[in-house]
């Protein structure tokens, strides 16, 4: 039987240990009532349209809080505007960690800003989860075990288009109009990789700036090349311009647009549905403006969510739908953490998602991760617009982290 003095000492040590654990949890952005989540978004500047991702995520977490939170803890989502400036993104990330004490960074948008913050977050062992970029650099657990992407890689998407072209249009002349940034370069590089020796069939490629005032000139040059296939990689606003300009020039190539621009509401309808007939893309999310999903339960829930929580939003906001789906994935991870909300367990659970199916992903496309697999979504579906709806082309495609789509 333990002596009274030893019992008192053991109790003191136990209480001290519990206090230390509690304090450490608080330092990691977790209290008995709250989980703090950090985020960086371009709410202003040339990419401000993608700020809708952060706004939808904030609204999603508000919905979760109204439903009781995660195991009784409410989510405090702290999102800052970096104006697409990498230096600002790093400074704001430091502030979120050192001043606001967030548990993790979630869903921050863009390649340059996330790359700027990656080293800092990994050195401090803070999860940089579900980065809103398709750059493969965010899926390298060997070098950066605290950073994980979410969407399919841009290069893999480019390889998917290359494989499609090889299969259906071998030997045809190709031109490309791509956004002059890391995203555009990655997708174009994937296209070249996938074409291999046939990359010589890319007879003209033009890199353009987002705020470029000469899109009409660029499209006109591409038309004069005599090409049969146009691959476009850029933001939705430029995509709908390019489609409309090509139609005005009476040019009707096989028109391929990147996933980010594969939206009936934000791209095809503004470009003119009649001008958009035949447009091809590769995507992984449902399109809430596609009548094919009008009776889909997940789309109904998404539309109800927009009405109740995502106030002031337009009806055609594909970026917001992306944010909703990414937030749903984070909630799944936090639920799986239970009461162990240490950063280590957050990464453990994020890297143990097997065949998880967020509600707005296309059928046959789910999320799987592993200790050495930090690219959650690895599948895409080729689709073609028939003037009313996206029609699937073939089967769901699974792309490897590197190498060709298969």
Image (cartoon, grey):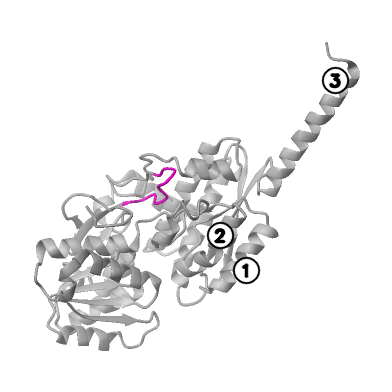
Residue carrying label 1: 91
Q: Residue 59 at x, y = what percent? A: 52, 55
Q: Tag 2, which secondary structure?
A: strand
* Front disc: 3 or 1: 3
Q: Residue 187 at x, y = what percent? A: 31, 68
Q: Residue 156 at x, y = what percent? A: 29, 60
Which mark identifies residue 7? 3
Q: Is residue 298 visible?
A: yes
Which comes before the other along the chain, label 1 or label 2? 2
Distance between mark 3 and mark 2 Cα atoms: 47 Å
In the image, residue 38 sits, relative to residue 170, either above or below, namely above
Q: Tag 3, which secondary structure?
A: helix
* Front disc: 3 or 2: 3
- Residue 306 relative to residue 272: left or right: right
Sort mark 3 into few (<14), some (14-19) or many (20+) by Cα contacts within 10 Å. Answer: few
Is 376 within the magenta? yes
Q: Quadrant for residue 87, please give it.
A: bottom right
Are the residues tagged 1 and 2 within 8 Å (C-beta)? no
Sort mark 1 into few (<14), some (14-19) or many (20+) by Cα contacts within 10 Å. Answer: few
Q: Is residue 389 visible?
A: no
Q: Tag 1, which secondary structure?
A: helix
Residue carrying label 2: 39
In the image, residue 200 sits, relative to residue 320, either above or below, namely below
The secondary structure making up most of the magenta span is loop
Q: Residue 368 at x, y = what percent? A: 37, 44
Residue pictured at 53% horizontal, 48% vertical: 63
Q: Tell me where the magenta segment starts and ends, as one range.
A: 369-378
Distance between mark 3 and mark 1 Cα atoms: 49 Å
Residue pictured at 31% horizontal, 63% vertical: 155
Distance between mark 1 and mark 2 Cα atoms: 12 Å
């Amino acid at each position: 039987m333990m002596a009274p003095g030893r019992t008192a000492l053991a109790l003191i040590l136990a209480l001290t240990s519990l206090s230390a654990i509690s304090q450490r949890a608080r330092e990691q952005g977790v209290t008995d009532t709250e989980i703090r989540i950090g985020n960086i978004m371009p709410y202003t500047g040339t990419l401000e349209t993608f700020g809708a991702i952060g706004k939808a995520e904030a609204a999603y977490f508000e919905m979760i809080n109204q439903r009781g939170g995660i195991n009784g803890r409410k989510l405090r989502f702290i999102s800052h505007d970096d104006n697409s400036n990498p230096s600002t993104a790093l400074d704001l990330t430091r502030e979120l960690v050192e001043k606001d004490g967030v548990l993790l960074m979630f869903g921050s948008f863009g390649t340059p800003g996330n790359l700027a913050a990656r080293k800092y977050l990994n050195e401090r062992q803070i999860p940089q989860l579900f980065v809103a970029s398709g750059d493969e650099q965010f899926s390298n657990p060997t070098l950066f075990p605290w950073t994980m992407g979410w969407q399919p890689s841009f290069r893999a998407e480019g390889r998917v288009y290359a494989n499609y072209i090889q299969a259906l249009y071998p030997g045809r002349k190709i031109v490309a109009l791509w956004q002059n940034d890391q995203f555009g370069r990655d997708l174009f590089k994937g296209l070249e990789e996938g074409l291999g020796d046939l990359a010589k069939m890319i007879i003209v490629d033009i890199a353009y700036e987002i705020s470029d005032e000469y899109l009409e000139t660029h499209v006109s040059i591409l038309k004069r090349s005599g090409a049969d296939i146009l691959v476009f990689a850029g933001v939705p606003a430029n995509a709908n311009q390019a489609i409309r300009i090509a139609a005005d020039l009476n040019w009707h190539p096989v028109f391929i647009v990147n996933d980010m621009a594969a939206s009936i509401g934000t791209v095809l309808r503004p470009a003119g549905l009649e001008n958009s007939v035949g447009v091809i893309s590769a995507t992984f999310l449902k399109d809430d403006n596609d009548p094919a999903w009008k009776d889909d339960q997940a789309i109904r829930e998404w539309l109800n969510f927009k009405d109740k929580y995502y106030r002031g939003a337009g009806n055609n906001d594909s970026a917001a739908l992306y944010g909703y789906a990414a937030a749903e994935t984070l909630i799944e991870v936090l639920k799986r953490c239970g009461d162990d909300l240490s950063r280590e367990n957050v990464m453990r659970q994020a890297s143990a998602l097997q065949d998880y199916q967020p509600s707005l992903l296309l059928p046959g496309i789910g999320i799987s991760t592993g200790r050495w697999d930090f690219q959650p979504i690895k599948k895409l579906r080729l689709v073609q617009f028939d003037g009313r709806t996206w029609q699937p082309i073939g089967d769901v495609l699974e792309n490897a982290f590197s190498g060709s789509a298969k």
